Image (tube, grey):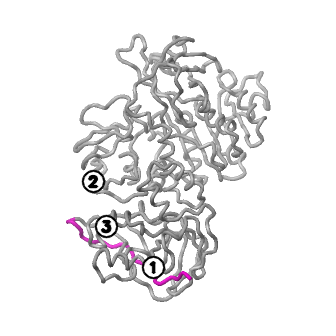
Amino acid sequence: MAKLLSVNVSLPKEIVAKGKTVRTGIFKEPVHGRVRVNALNIEGDGQADLLGHGGEFRAVYVYSFANYAYWERELGRADFKMGQFGENFTVEGMLDREVHVGDIFRIGTTLFEVTQPRVPCYKLALKMGVEGFYNKILESGRLGFYFRVLEEGEVGAGDTVERVKGDPIGMTIVEVNKLMYFDKDNLDGFRKALDVKALSPGWRGTFEGRIAKAKTSAVTQEKYRTFIVDRKVPESEIITSFYLVPEDGKPLAPFLPGQFLPLRLDIPGQFKHVLRTYSLSDSPGKNYYRLTIKREPAPPDRPDVYPGVSSTYFHDSVKKGSKLLAKSPRGKFTLDPNNDTPVVLMSAGVGLTPMISMLNAIVEGGSKRPTWFIHGSRNRRVHAMGDHVRRVAAEHGHVRAHIRYSEPLSEERVGSDYDDKGRVDIDLLRSLLPSKDFDFYLCGPAPFMKSMFNGLLDWGVPEVRINYEFFGPASALGGDRAKVSTPKRAAEVTECCGEIEVVFSRSGVKANWNPSFESILDLAEANGLSPDYSCRSGICHTCVCKLEEGEVEYVLEPLDLPDPGSALICCSQPKTNIVVDV
C-alpha cells in the first residue's frame, strides 16, 4: 500500500552560488499536521521560476523515498532529510517504473492526476552540492513526477495513497522520460504518448513538434527546386490560384495544413531575386502545390506607390508552363486535422488561403472534428472559393460556415451568396458559437487580426488556444500580444536551463538559455519581451536584431542570411554567451 511519508514546502528565497544571487524554492522543509492543497499549489509553497516549475500541470512534485537509499549509495552520503530533492510529497510505494502518466490517485481528501516526469534544473545541483547532478538524475531514470490537482482538499503525512484509476495507455514515468531525453527519434513512442490525454501541454507540444519536424526535416540546407505552373485558375476578380508541379517528377516534400511555400522569383526590372512566401491553399497529399494569390494594387490614397511586385508578377507574367524556384514548405501556423477538439477557422480577405488548406485536410482525412469556417470579404466579386466552402459545409455535418460581406452588391442574396452584412468581429463569434471552448485560428489583414486577437482575449479564451498567421510585424496586434506570448512559451519548457547566458541589452533582461526553446525569440517571449517577428521561419527578416556580442547558430536555414553583426532571432540559438539588441 502506497503512503505519503512527508509533505514539504518552501517559499522562494535567495542564495548565492558561483558568485551569483539565485532565487529558488527548492529548499523544502517538512510540514507537521494537515495542509491545504489548492489547484496551483500547496499552502505555504511557492516557485521562483514559473517557466520551469509550478502551474496547473506541475502543481505538486512527488518523489519516492526508495530513491533516497539509491542516492545515498551513489553519492556516499547519509545526510538526507525529507524534501531533499525539492519534492512536495515524499512517498512510499510509488516508483517511477510503476506509475503511469494519467494515473489518478486520492490522498486524504484531494484527488490528483499524474501529468509528466520531473524537469530537473541546475538548482537541484546547487541543492545537492553535486556539479551536474541534473544529468545524473536524468540518466538514473529516478526523476519523480508531477501531479495536477483534480479536486482540492487536505493532505497530511501518514495518509494512504489510493490509485483510483490507471491510465489505459499505460506509459510509465520512466518510459516517457526516455522519450523526452534519450530516444528523440522514436516517432511511434511520441504518438503513443500523445494518446495519453493527461500529458501536460509542454511535453505534448515537444512530442508534436518532433513529429512535425520529422516530416519536414529536409527543409534545412536544401537547394531550390524547379516547379512548373500546371494550371492558372481565377478565383475572383483579384485572386488567382496557381497549381505547381515538380519539374523532376519526384514526390513533393510533405507539409502541414497552414504552412507556406518559400519562393525565389526572378522578376524583370528587379536588381536582385525577390524572396516571397505564399500560403499553400490546398490539403497535403496532392500531386501539386496550390498557391492562391491576391493582386495587390497601390493603396487607394497613395497612387504614387508601386503595386505589389510579386503579386503583379504572378498575375501578369506567370502562365501555364512558367517555371518557378521554391524550397520545401515551412511555417509554424499549423493544424493537426486528427485532433478532435472543436476548431474555428477565421479569416478575412485573402487570409482564407491557409484556412482552406486546414478545412480540406480535416474533411479529406475523414476527421469528424467539429469545425466552424468564418470568413469576411467585401463581396462576391473579390471573394475567393466561397462556393467550395459552402459545398464542404453542405456535404459534412460537422462543418458549419458563415460568410459576411461588408459591401454586398445589390444582386447578391443573403443565404446563398453570403450570410449577413458587416465585418467579422467578436460579437459575431459570440452569437454563432455555443461556447468559447474551441481552438481558434486567425489570418487576415492587420485591423481584422488586432480586433479578433484582442477580442478573444477579452472574451476569456485561453491564450494557448489562439493561433495566428500574420503577414507583418506582430507588434501591430497591439500591447495585448504579450498576454499570449509569455505564458504560451512558458508552457513549452521541458528541460533544465543551461549555462549559456542571453542578455537582451535594450530591455535590461538576462536569462540562461533553455534548450526547450527553439529560438532566441522564444526565450525573449518567455521572459516577457515582445520583439517584432512575422514568419518565425527565417524568411522575412522582420525579427533581425543587432548581435552585440557572441555567436549564434541557425536551427533553420534562413533563405537570406542577415548582415554580419546581426541575427535572425526567430530561427537561431545561442552558440556562446550573447548580447542582442532587444
Q: Which mark is residue 501?
A: 2
Mark 1 residue type: Thr
Kindly give the residue lying farthest to the left in the view shown.
19
Q: CA distance from mark 3 to mark 2?
A: 20 Å
Rendered view: 27 above or below 457: below
The front one of 69 and 62 is 69
Residue on which the image places disc 3 = 133
x then y, percent, for residue 214: 48, 41
x then y, percent, for residue 497: 34, 58
The span shown in magenta is 1-19
Residue 12 falls within the magenta-colored stretch: yes
Q: Residue at x 26, y 66 (%)?
A: 131
The front one of 65 and 568 is 65
Q: Is residue 336 left or right of residue 511?
A: right
Q: Residue at x 76, y 22 (%)?
A: 410
Residue on which the image places disc 1 = 90
- SS category of the residue bearing label 1: strand
Rendered view: 76 above or below 240: below
Q: CA distance from mark 1 to mark 2?
A: 34 Å
Classify the position of the N terminus by image quarter: bottom right
Q: Main secondary structure of the magenta part?
A: strand
**Nearest-to-viewer mark from 1 and 2:** 1
Based on the displayed image, in which of its 4 quarters is residue 138 positioned? bottom left
- SS category of the residue bearing label 2: strand
Mark 3 residue type: Phe
- SS category of the residue bearing label 3: helix
Classify the position of the C terminus by image quarter: top left
Q: Earlier in the sequence, mark 3 or mark 1?
A: 1
